[in-house]
Amino acid sequence: MKLLIIKIETSHEIEDALSVYSQDVLHCLGTETRKRSDFEHAGWENDSTIVNLEEINDLPQDLEFYAYFREDSDRDKLLADFRQKLQELKGYGLDIGQAKISASYIEDKDWNTVWQKFYHVINFSRHLAIVPEWENYQPQFSDQKLINLDPGLAFGTGGHKTTQLAMMGLERTLTAPKSVIDVGTGSGILAIAASLLGANEVIGTDVSDEAVTAAQENVALNHLDNIQIKKANLLENIDGKFDIIVANILAEILLDLIPQLNDHLQKGGKVIFSGIDYLQLTKVEKALDNYDFKVELTMKQDRWVSLVIARKEQ
Ligand SMILES: C[S@@+](CC[C@H](N)C(=O)[O-])C[C@H]1O[C@@H](n2cnc3c(N)ncnc32)[C@H](O)[C@@H]1O
């Protein structure tokens, strides 16, 4: 099988935004980057290495971003989508650099496993470590819980800042055995984290078939019997109310979720939002205020913001 590869020569400022857009909205198979700063830093990290940038072939001007798709994907539409996304990001005042986009086809070198060599244990916190299925890990504390994971084609290796901020939100809000729904579960990582942190029942939902399959496999891998994975568009057709609603999805999609929150949140419940680019924070905060929610905690890492939210009147 061949893969369609879309290359974007752009600025490092929009690396995260392009990565999430490619995976979350365009459902690419994977992404890769080459950064000029990586070559420059190689010289700083080891004094004995003198990196002469002029001698490096194809040195990126700033960032080269690659997104991989199935061979039969609609190439022209993807190119148009990326062009539009770049203009949108430029509209937010972000540097989009050269903004050169091109497409080509390459042989698939077993993409599903090549990336595994870059994915290692994440010793996340006092309570949690994320362990790729193919690695061994000895917990640092005897009661540290392990999330065993093979994300496959789904988003959610645990390496992304947005996932980590959402996990911090879960650690903060799961102060007793509670019910949790993880909207946009991807690999199932947050649903599994919630169960391991002591949630009594957990539902994970996703619109993507690949995510639903990956999440179900990861739930089985962790031998957890209190998690159900369902295919759903946000909270549509989901019955019941939950103590905690967690969602790590782009801000545009979180805005669609806000009107659905009240009907699915228990009295005294909390909502955790992650995946908000700081430039979109005001829009999200305003929408929450309009629906009678207040922000109780704001967490930030790089350009990503995560919120712990409650009803104004509890
Ligand atoms: C950024 S990933 C988060 C994955 C995982 N929860 C994590 O934190 O790493 C967002 C996920 O939301 C899913 N998604 C996007 N739009 C959705 C929608 N309208 N309803 C449900 N899931 C959606 C995507 O398929 C993707 O798996």
Image (cartoon, grey):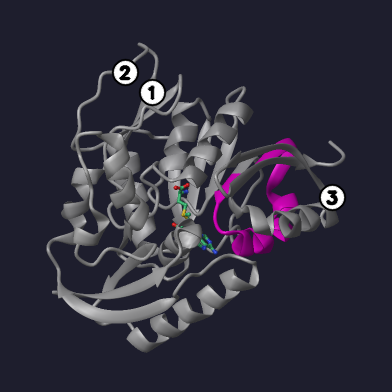
* Image disc number at residue 145: 1
As shown in the figure, which amino acid type bears the numbered disc 2? Pro
- Where is residue 148, by image quadrant? top left
Position of 266 relative to 110 (above/below): above
- Give x and y (percent) for residue 275: 56, 52
Where does label 2 land, which residue? 139
**Label 3 residue SS:** loop
- Dot 2: few (<14), some (14–19), or many (≥20) neighbours within 10 Å? some
Compared across the picture, whether 283 is left or right of 122 comes to right
- Give whichever of discs 3 and 2 has the lower sequence position: 2
- Give whichever of discs 2 and 1 has the lower sequence position: 2
Residue 261 among magenta residues: yes
- Give whichever of discs 1 and 3 has the lower sequence position: 1
Looking at the rendered structure, the number of numbered marks drawn on it comes to: 3
Residue 168 among magenta residues: no
- Where is residue 233, by image quadrant? bottom right
Compared across the picture, whether 174 is left or right of 295 comes to left
**Label 1 residue SS:** strand
Q: What is the distance, in whole Å, between disc 2 and disc 1 at their CAs?
A: 8 Å
The residue at the point 47 percent across, 41 percent down is 190
Residues marked 2 and 1 touching at CB (< 8 Å):
yes
- Where is residue 123, by image quadrant? top left
- Give x and y (percent) for residue 198: 50, 25
Image quadrant in which the N terminus is located: bottom left
As shown in the figure, which amino acid type bears the numbered disc 1? Lys
Where does label 3 land, which residue? 292
Along the viewing direction, whichever of 41 and 175 lies nearer the viewer: 41
The residue at the point 80 percent across, 56 percent down is 286
* Image disc number at residue 58: none
